[in-house]
Amino acid sequence: MAINVNTVYTTVLSILNKEQRGYLTPDEFNKTATQVQLEEFEKFFQDYNQYLRMPKTDEEFASRVDHIREEFQVFEKTGTASNNPAADSNVYNQPVDLHRFGSATYTKAFEQPAFEIVSSREYTEQVLSPLLQPSMNFPIAKYQQDKLTVFPPLTTFSNSDVSFNYIRKPEDVRWGYVVGPLGQYIYDDTAFSNTKLAISSLAGSINFNSAAATVGTYPLTQGAIGVGNNTFQTNGAGTGAKLKVVVSGTGTTTLSAANTAISVTVQGTGYAVGDTLTIAAESFATANPSAAITITLTSANLMSGTGQGSKQFEISDSLQTNLILGVLKYAGVIIKDTQVIQAASGLQQLDEQNSKK
């Protein structure tokens, strides 16, 4: 099970506050936590290599090799090539999130054999040799500059011809928050996404088109525009968001920034900077079918432009102590306290030594 980012952050703050060592802002924590998780992640492969050379045990739950495999299997993926150059039938770019290459298979061949990865010299020698020339069932490839050059090539090809088995990096950690009435940070456990709308008032690029509306509150869902539907549309790929429009005043009024407040109540997903949200006049129970309000999304309207939304640690909860000590070590650097650095580093080294005895 992954580690909750709020648990780690509140624990780090509690330790710092108890010792009166200072404060770690959410942005500082997110940067240091991401770095610590990456360090723990890279240690998996060093430990795996070490344990493979040590005497092994077959006892259940006691095998160090099996334990490390459990740790990094979360990051193991299978994916196709990306952005294959149209002119090169035997060159395949690796997946964009590949971090450690494992193996590759030829999906177009019978039983999808794995490529034998060879050097550039060996590749040339085998391709030119009448005796050693590879076949579809025994293909070879050279791996250079994040590309696989394979043999034999295909006359018609696509990115799905080659399947990669690889390890991706863990995603950046994010302790999300909203600002409370006293200016305090309040944890936001909503799953973060770059394409979600931020829960906030929409402001900035809004065109009211001199439309009129009856004073009141209008909850809007995304969908087809129609009389009484209380809906809005978008020209992008976003779906699922909900808005609320509050028109203040009396009777019927002309919409403007002074009397119309628009806010996001449900974030949805798939939105991007430059997308437009269009609210038709029918949503305000008027007869005019034209667009009453047009909103062009800016970076401040998306979750990525705010502190909202969280991303949990992806490594397992067995490493929670290591993460807390690692963040405290970097916290000592940030608040310029050598005692915090030394204490955290000492405990971290002791914990690592004990784990390898």
Image (tube, rainbow, N blue to C red):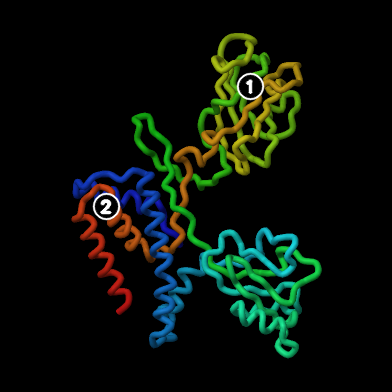
What's the residue type where badge 2 is placed?
Answer: Val
Mark 2 packing: few (<14 Cα in 10 Å), some, or many (20+)? some
User: Which residue corresponds to mark 2?
Assistant: 333
> Can you tell which of label 1 and label 2 is closer to the viewer?
2
Q: Which residue is mark 1?
A: 207
Is residue 282 toward the left or the right of residue 319 in the image? right
Residue at the far right in the pictured view: 155
Depicted 329 relative to depicted 182: above or below: below
Q: Quadrant of residue 48?
A: bottom left
Residue type (three-letter) at the residue carrying disc 1? Asn
Residue appearing at x 38%, y 54% in the figure: 33
Mark before the other along the chain sequence, 1 or 2: 1
Helix, strand or loop at disc 2?
helix
Determine whether 83 is above or below 52 in the image. Answer: above
Which of the image's four quarters has the N terminus?
A: bottom left
Of residues 60 and 2, the one nearer the viewer is 2
Q: Is residue 103 placed above or below 55 in the rendered structure?
A: above
288 horizontally vs 12: left or right? right
Q: Residue at x 35, y 59 (%)?
A: 323
Q: Secondary structure at mark 1?
A: strand
Q: Is residue 354 toward the left or the right of residue 285 in the image? A: left
Residue 192 placed where, x, y %?
Answer: 51, 46
Q: Quadrant of the C terminus?
A: bottom left
Question: Does residue 180 appear to the left or right of 121 in the view shown?
Answer: left
> Where does residue 7 sit, x and y in percent of width and height?
36, 52
Front residue of this view, candidates 32 and 74:
32
